[in-house]
């Protein structure tokens, strides 16, 4: 199927927003990993963010905007491709596509739902009010983010939910990283196998990094 100029523009916007969101996912993991340094590590990290004042919320709103734009164009391109692709050609493309590439729209929407829950859980802090950092202070009177995270992930449902969500993220990024590089012209037929492997490798590293936090907490290795 020939892409229209409008479709090419939307694919490029998806690639750009996807790259920015990928960068955030990496930086966010580095920040979250401060939980392994104990209460002082993640509580200091959270306090430094809080001291940035409204800048943090502006950044969060920008990230949410990028997510909305990314998903909006993803849905529109999926619907457009589905409507314009003949049945026989679609069957052939389906056989060549991977599970990750076929489910991009579904994993994207699932991640959006998880992000909303995640914000309610650890940012707005209304799902586990008793553990909310804003009403529990550490030894030097800082919001006890460490206690909130540890107590939150002591709950089996929460841990399972986060692990499943990170598996969904892995599936999305497994194809997403390759798609970004291909869209911006950094991948060709010769380099595609390497790019594909690198994308899956990065997605796997992020998966291990993110799930290590709830798993080590519920296993009692990281504890208060």
Image (cartoon, helix red, strand yellow):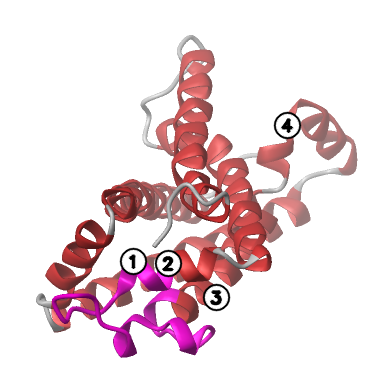
Label drawn at residue 146: 1
Provide the residue designation for mark 4.
97
Label 3 or label 4, whichever comes before in sequence order:
4
Query: Which residue corresponds to the image point at 30% horizontal and 87% vertical from the top-left?
Result: 134
Tell me the CA gap for discs 3 and 4.
31 Å
Q: Are marks 2 and 1 in contact (CB under 8 Å)?
A: yes
Tell me the CA gap for discs 3 and 1.
19 Å
* Side (left or right) of 63 relative to 177: left
Callout 2: few (<14), some (14-19), or many (20+) C-alpha neighbours within 10 Å?
many
Q: Are marks 4 and 1 in contact (CB under 8 Å)?
A: no
Provide the residue designation for mark 3.
117
Q: Are marks 2 and 4 in contact (CB under 8 Å)?
A: no
Callout 3: few (<14), some (14-19), or many (20+) C-alpha neighbours within 10 Å?
some
Dot in front, 3 or 1: 1
Dot in front, 3 or 2: 2
Provide the residue designation for mark 2.
149
In the image, residue 5 above or below residue 130: above
Tell me the CA gap for discs 4 and 1.
42 Å
Query: Which residue corresponds to the image point at 82% horizontal and 39% vertical from the top-left?
Result: 90
């Amino acid at each position: 199927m020939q892409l229209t100029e409008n479709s090419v523009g939307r694919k490029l916007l998806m690639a750009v927003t996807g790259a920015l969101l990928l960068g955030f996912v990496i930086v966010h993991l580095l920040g979250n990993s401060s939980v392994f340094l104990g209460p002082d590590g993640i509580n200091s990290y959270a306090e430094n963010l809080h001291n940035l004042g409204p800048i943090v919320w502006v950044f969060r709103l920008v990230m949410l905007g990028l997510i909305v734009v990314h998903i909006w164009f993803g849905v529109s391109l999926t619907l457009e491709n589905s409507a314009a692709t003949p049945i026989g050609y679609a069957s052939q493309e389906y056989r060549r596509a991977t599970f990750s590439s076929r489910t991009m729209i579904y994993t994207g929407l699932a991640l959006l739902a998880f992000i909303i829950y995640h914000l309610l859980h650890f940012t707005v802090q209304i799902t586990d009010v008793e553990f909310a950092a804003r009403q529990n202070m550490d030894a030097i009177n800082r919001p006890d983010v460490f206690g909130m995270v540890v107590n939150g992930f002591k709950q089996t449902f929460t841990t399972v939910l986060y692990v499943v969500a990170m598996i969904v993220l892995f599936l999305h990024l497994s194809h997403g990283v390759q798609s970004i590089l291909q869209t911006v012209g950094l991948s060709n037929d010769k380099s595609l196998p390497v790019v594909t492997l690198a994308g899956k490798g990065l997605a796997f590293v992020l998966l291990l990094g993110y799930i290590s936090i709830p798993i080590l907490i519920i296993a009692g290795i990281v504890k208060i």
